[in-house]
Structures are given as structure tokens and as C-alpha cells.
Image: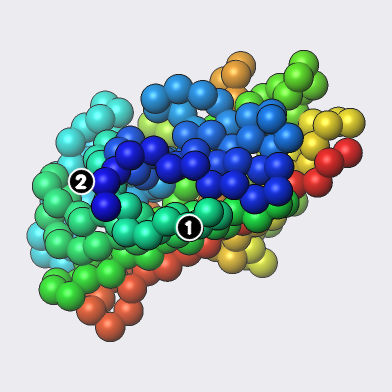
Amino acid sequence: MSNEPITLTAGDAEATVLPGNGGRIGGLRVGGTDLLRQGERYGCFPMVPWCGRIREGRFRDGAVVHQMPLNSPPHAIHGTARDAAWRTARVTADEAVLTYDLTDPWPYSGRVTQVIALTGDALTLTMSVETYESSFPAQIGWHPWFNRTLDGTGVEIAFDPAWQEERGDDHLPTGNRIDPKPGPWDDCFGMPDGVDVTLTWPERLELKVTSREEWVVVYDEQEAAVCVEPQTGPPDGLNTLPRLVTPLEPLEATTTWRWTRL
């Protein structure tokens, strides 16, 4: 199938999926109001095969050191799949399945599958990375840009992390865990019982971002949008907390955004 834009509908919710632009969600409208910041690099994009920054773009796999392009100098950021066209494998009225085959500059072969499923009050994103050849470290995550204001109403962010990853001057975790600090944030937090972050636009909408994963990056330093990014490990995790994809064991993750009218 082609990589043309896809529109999913359920009740008064509508999601636009853009396979040709990094497999991202281009828009999510609830009752005609778009929850995501619009623009070619916004919406919500999948972070794979890594999340956040890799220190100086280098990661080690056994004795071999691999160098990724420095697309956020001096680091490499957010994986390679957001810059590629994905393939549409299957579409129904309320669900789309996309695939992306890992290729250069990523040094390993593998397939990423993303399932986007819409209901009248939720959007669920599921992603897996599998290989039939060499094992390799990888990460999965999502990077949504939620509009800071809806119809003039500003958002409030609420969550209760167990810790915050101390951030160095290079924007990467130092390895120390500290008590969570007040925002603004461009920081990674640990939620061992699963990611659970609530965005509230008072008298408009409440949206809960949940995931079984225990890592979430919250970014609210931008005037137009806030980001809540569930992921399978911290920034630079290919080096500090590698999760191996093997022929017998794919890497899988899911996040759900559930909304309620206020």
C-alpha cells in the first residue's frame, strides 16, 4: 500500500496518520479541536531505534563502537525512523498498521511495526522492533507535541515520579537520581509503576498519558506546546541501559492517551 495520509475516525475523534512523514500522527482532533501542535516536524513522531540523545552519537555493542549522524550536535537525537517514509500495511476506519525497515545509518537490519488505534475517547500507540538476524540494542518511544493552549485555555501538567534523572550541562543524564524538581523541564523521570501523566486544560479537557514503561521525558520549555514522551529507557540508554532485540525476543511498547471532557 502507499504512504499517503490516513484519516482514522471514532465518534467525534479524528486522527491523521502520516506514513510518508516519519510514521507520525499529524493531528488528533476531539470535537473539532486539535490537541497536537501542527507542522511538518510536530504532531507525534515515533522515536526508534533510540530515544532522546546519544552522547556524541556513539554507542557500543560488545566490542564495536557505532557512530550515528550528529543531528543535534554534539549528539544524535530521537532515532532515524522519524526522518523516513513508513509503509502502510493495513488500514481500517479506526486503526492503521505501519512498518519501517531499519537501514543506514543504523547498522543493523530489523523491522519496526507501529499500530495506531483510535476509539471515541482514546488513542493507543503500539510499537515493536524485531530482527531475524543480529541482535542489537534499541529503544522505543513517542514524542507528542500537545498544544499548550486549547481555545485560549492553558494546560496544567500533573504527575508523581519516583525520581528525576539529574541532567548535566550536555542535556544528558549524569547517572544520579534526584528528587523531582519543579519545571520548566527538559528532563527524564522514573515511574516504576508505569508512566501516568495528566494534562488538564481547565473546563475544557483532561488527557491522561499512560504506559507500562517506567521512563518518561517531559518537555515544557516551548511556548506553543508541551511534550510527554513515554519510552523504554532514559536518554543515552543505548549506552547506559541497553535493551537487546534478538531473533527470539522483540522489543515492544505501548502508550495510551485517554481524554475526558470537563
Q: Residue 188 in the image: x percent, y percent? A: 54, 45
Front-lying residue, 89 or 36: 89
**Which residue occupies 45% across, 22% down?**
39
Residue at mark 2: 58
Residue 200 left/right relative to 66:
right
One can see residue 94 in this view: yes
Residue 184 left/right relative to 239:
right
Residue at mark 1: 92
Badge 2 amino acid: Arg
Badge 1 amino acid: Thr
Quadrant assignment, res 52: top left
Q: Residue 174 in the image: x percent, y percent? A: 44, 45
**Which residue occupies 88% across, 39% down?**
262
Give the number of the mark in front: 2 or 1.
Answer: 1
Q: Residue 13 in the image: x percent, y percent? A: 66, 43
Quadrant assignment, res 249: bottom left
One can see residue 159 in this view: no
Q: Secondary structure at mark 2?
A: strand
For marks 2 and 1 on the same chain, the one whose residue lies earlier in the sequence: 2
